[in-house]
Image (spheres, grey):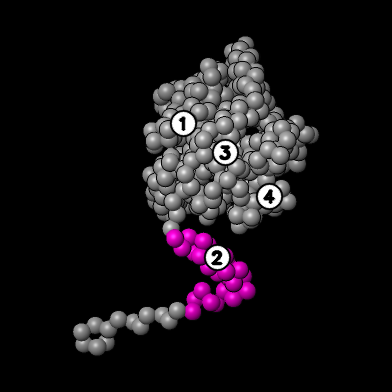
């Protein structure tokens, strides 16, 4: 029997790029005859039955097994995987620089900082560091990973192949121009710049237009409030925050979009760009981080965020049908090149490379690591039944001033 090749990550999300890639990797590994499970701390309820609890990793562990570790912000699952004797390849999807979350999400500032610091510790633990883009691979190399490569993202568009759901999207099915962005409503995506460009387009080029912002914003209510304040100050009409949508609803919104506008300043790959290619939506994107490589010469890359200039580009795409058709043809060609990449063969070659390499020494861990894991598990089991136990410490007495008051 070949060794098992398992995946481990903090959470498996529904409909997001990492979740889709994890499921695609599992399909490839199982088709090749490998036993392959997905170990997580948490999972979307719609995917929970496809996963195993990360605390079951030790019982599945073996020195000849391979762990494909999807590293995000660092997690208990990450630290447990580090301590096991299994061989490991780290798959890096990038961590947003923490400065983007200052004044918006203080806890995420800390998590991103610690995640980037913790990432470097895996350079000596992993047989191979894999970026899902050349941009991400270069980050791993800069952190000291001795062996790096690219496991290309070859998106699976099956989630967009079903019948569209127009129950909500139908209200936007008219003669107006729909400018759309898809992605989480978070600061590095620079939704504020998207709004500024749309404001210029709506005011100076086409008042019969609207902006559709599709993506979750849970945990970022403060950022969304800042965006709403910007909308009010500019007086921008017809900006719609649509939240997290189902795959069928997402398909409908893509079908109604006239142009996809991206102003993001930090992306490890940016799957919605190629989703737009697949759905035939012309793309305008800011040329930052991994985006030029993802676009692969297709769509329109802009280097200047001046709202009037970008709005003029949108107007040209919307009003010139020949130009829009040429853009879509170029995007189709880029998508063909992307899908021609042998994702399955590349993944399996990396697995073979790890199997044939001499085993690395077992990773150093604290002498009481597993004792701490056991105590942590006991506390987690206690939390749902006796939450008061976590508030049992006596409260400090109020301080008195010098007069004893």
Asked if the residue at tag 2 contacts the one at tag 4, i.e. Cβ–Cβ closer than 8 Å, the answer is no
The residue that label 1 is drawn on is: 147
Asked if the residue at tag 3 contacts the one at tag 1, i.e. Cβ–Cβ closer than 8 Å, the answer is no
Residue at the bottom extreme, as displayed: 404
The residue that label 3 is drawn on is: 183
Instruction: Give the SS element for disc 4.
Output: loop
Calculate the distance from the C-alpha at mark 1 to the C-alpha at mark 2: 34 Å
Asked if the residue at tag 1 contacts the one at tag 4, i.e. Cβ–Cβ closer than 8 Å, the answer is no
Q: Residue at x 61, y 27 (%)?
A: 349
Q: Is residue 248 visible?
A: yes
Q: Give how far across and how far down residue 22 sits, in percent.
A: 64, 39
The residue that label 2 is drawn on is: 374
Q: Is residue 285 visible?
A: no
Magenta region: which residues?
A: 367-392
**Along the polypeptide, which appears first: circle 1 or circle 3?**
1
Calculate the distance from the C-alpha at mark 3 to the C-alpha at mark 4: 25 Å
The residue that label 4 is drawn on is: 51
Calculate the distance from the C-alpha at mark 3 to the C-alpha at mark 2: 38 Å
Asked if the residue at tag 2 contacts the one at tag 1, i.e. Cβ–Cβ closer than 8 Å, the answer is no
Q: Give how far across and how far down residue 135 sits, in percent.
A: 46, 29
In this rendering, the answer to whether 365 lies above or below 285 is: below
Q: Give whichever of 324, 162 is nearer the camera.
A: 162
């Amino acid at each position: 029997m070949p060794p098992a090749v398992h995946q481990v990550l903090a959470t498996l999300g529904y409909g997001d790029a990492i979740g889709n890639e994890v499921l695609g990797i599992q399909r490839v590994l199982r088709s090749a005859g490998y036993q392959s499970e997905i170990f997580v701390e948490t999972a979307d309820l719609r995917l929970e039955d496809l996963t195993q609890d990360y605390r079951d990793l030790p019982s599945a562990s073996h020195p000849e097994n391979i762990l494909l570790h999807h590293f995000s912000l660092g997690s208990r699952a990450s630290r447990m995987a580090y301590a096991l004797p299994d061989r490991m390849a780290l798959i890096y999807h990038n961590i947003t620089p923490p400065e983007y979350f200052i004044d918006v999400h203080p806890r995420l500032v800390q998590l991103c900082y610690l995640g980037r610091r913790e990432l470097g510790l895996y350079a000596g633990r992993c047989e191979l560091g894999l970026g899902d883009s050349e941009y991400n691979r270069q980050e791993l190399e800069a952190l000291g990973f001795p062996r790096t490569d690219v496991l290309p993202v070859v998106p699976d568009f099956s989630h967009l192949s079903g019948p569209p759901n127009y129950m909500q999207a139908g209200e936007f099915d008219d003669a107006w121009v729909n400018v759309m962005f898809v992605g989480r409503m978070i600061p590095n995506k620079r939704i504020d710049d998207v709004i500024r460009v749309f404001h210029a387009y709506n005011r100076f080029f086409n008042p019969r237009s609207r902006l559709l912002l599709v993506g979750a914003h849970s945990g970022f209510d403060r950022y969304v409030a800042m965006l709403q304040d910007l909308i009010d100050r500019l007086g921008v009409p017809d900006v719609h925050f649509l939240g997290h949508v189902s795959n069928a609803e997402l398909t409908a919104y893509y079908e109604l979009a006239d142009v996809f506008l991206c102003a993001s300043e930090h992306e490890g790959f940016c799957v919605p760009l190629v989703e737009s290619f697949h759905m035939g939506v012309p793309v305008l994107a800011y040329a930052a981080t991994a985006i030029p490589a993802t676009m692969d010469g297709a769509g329109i890359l802009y280097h200047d965020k001046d709202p009037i200039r970008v709005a003029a580009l949108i107007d040209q795409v919307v009003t010139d049908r020949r130009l829009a058709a040429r853009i879509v043809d170029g995007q189709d060609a880029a998508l063909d090149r992307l899908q021609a990449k042998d994702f399955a063969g590349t993944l399996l070659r990396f697995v073979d490379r790890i199997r044939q390499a001499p085993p690395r020494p077992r990773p150093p861990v604290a002498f009481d690591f597993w004792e701490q894991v056991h105590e942590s598990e006991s506390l987690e089991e206690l939390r749902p039944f006796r939450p008061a136990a976590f508030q049992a410490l006596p409260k400090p007495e109020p301080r008195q001033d010098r007069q004893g008051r």
